Amino acid sequence: MRSSQDAVPMPSSFEHRSAIVNDVNLHYVIGGKALGSAPLMLLIHGFPQNWWCWNGVIAELGERYTVVAPDLKGVGLSDKPAGGYTKREMAADLHALVESLHGAPAHIVGHDIGGMIAYAYASCYPARSLTIIDVTLPGIGDWDQVISDPRVWHFAFHQKRDLPEALIVGGREHVYISSFIHQQTFRRGSISLSDINEYVEAYRQPGAFRSAMEMYRQFPQDAIDNRSAGRLPEELPVLAIGGERRWAGRVGERLGTVSSKVTSVSIPDAGHFVAEEQPGRVIDAIFQFCG
């Protein structure tokens, strides 16, 4: 097995760590400002990625914040238990990680499924701010219409019990993940072959692909949980970032149904993987929003 610690370069001020929270060992990368000297910023990846998707932005974000980028439970070097993949449960893991670092309240940033987890985090725990990047949210806004949109064809496929694992695991991970990423990327080449290889290795670990599919299979419960939670805290500032060639301003429209403090930004010349396609613009948006 390739170890990310040995094979993946990252900013010299960052290091790999792990923590046991809620009986799960989470791998994470931490760096930037020293703990306690600046606000903590939690970066939550989505599918089919791991912490590495933030590698192009963590150095500059680290100039202002203590940056923590975990592998989600079920992915990469983190534990892969059989259950616990509702977004509330996954948010609880990350909140416990932030608490263990004495970093609460933190700025919470999430992309894709990580955005769903970030939303659950902000619904359940105090946060300095919430940033959601290019995702639709279970039970929020136009969710009932979006789940039939051809752009999210994979929602239904990934929720099919056992079938995705049977078709993909055991040799087809690279074909599936590379196709999945290229289909949703506007700036071709912004995600390199070495990047894709990192993601493939993260999902080739025993149990990882099954765990990822479980995250999708929990969408019906996530929708129930989000609707029952009601509106986001009134004082919470919310940043909605969409790729102009993917969800664009619709991210802000969705969040506008649950918050009156939404700042919406559409990133030009970007598809779904905004932080990798346009890292400078994402950094600028976060700096302008969070300070």
Image (tube, rainbow, N blue to C red):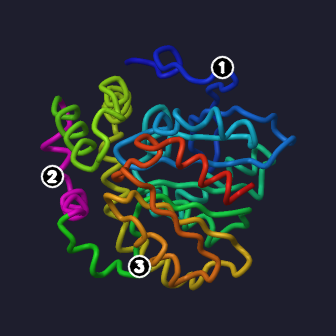
| Mark 3–mark 1 CB contact (< 8 Å) | no
Kindly report the distance in space between the C-alpha atoms of the residues bearing marks 3 and 1: 41 Å
Q: Which residue is mark 2?
A: 163
Q: Which residue is mark 3?
A: 139
Q: Earlier in the sequence, mark 2 or mark 1?
A: 1
Determine the residue positioned at 70% across, 24% down: 13
Determine the residue positioned at 73% across, 67% down: 126
Disc 2 secondary structure class: helix
Q: Position of residue 222 (x, y in %)?
A: 43, 71
Please tell me whether mark 3 or mark 1 is closer to you in this view. 1
Determine the residue positioned at 31% across, 58% down: 245
Disc 1 secondary structure class: loop
Place residue 124 in its image quadrant: bottom right
Q: Amino acid at mark 2?
A: Leu
Kindly report the distance in space between the C-alpha atoms of the residues bearing marks 2 and 1: 41 Å
Q: Amino acid at mark 3?
A: Gly
From this viewpoint, is residue 137 visible? Answer: no
Magenta-drawn stretch contains 217: no
Magenta-drawn stretch contains 153: yes
Q: Earlier in the sequence, mark 3 or mark 1?
A: 1
Main SS, magenta region, reads helix
Please tell me whether mark 2 or mark 1 is closer to you in this view. 1
Q: Which residue is mark 1?
A: 12
Disc 3 secondary structure class: loop
* On-image quarter of the N terminus: top left
Q: Position of residue 120 (x, y in %)?
A: 55, 67
Determine the residue positioned at 32% across, 31% down: 196
Extreme-left residue of the structure: 167
Where does the magenta region start and end?
A: 151-170
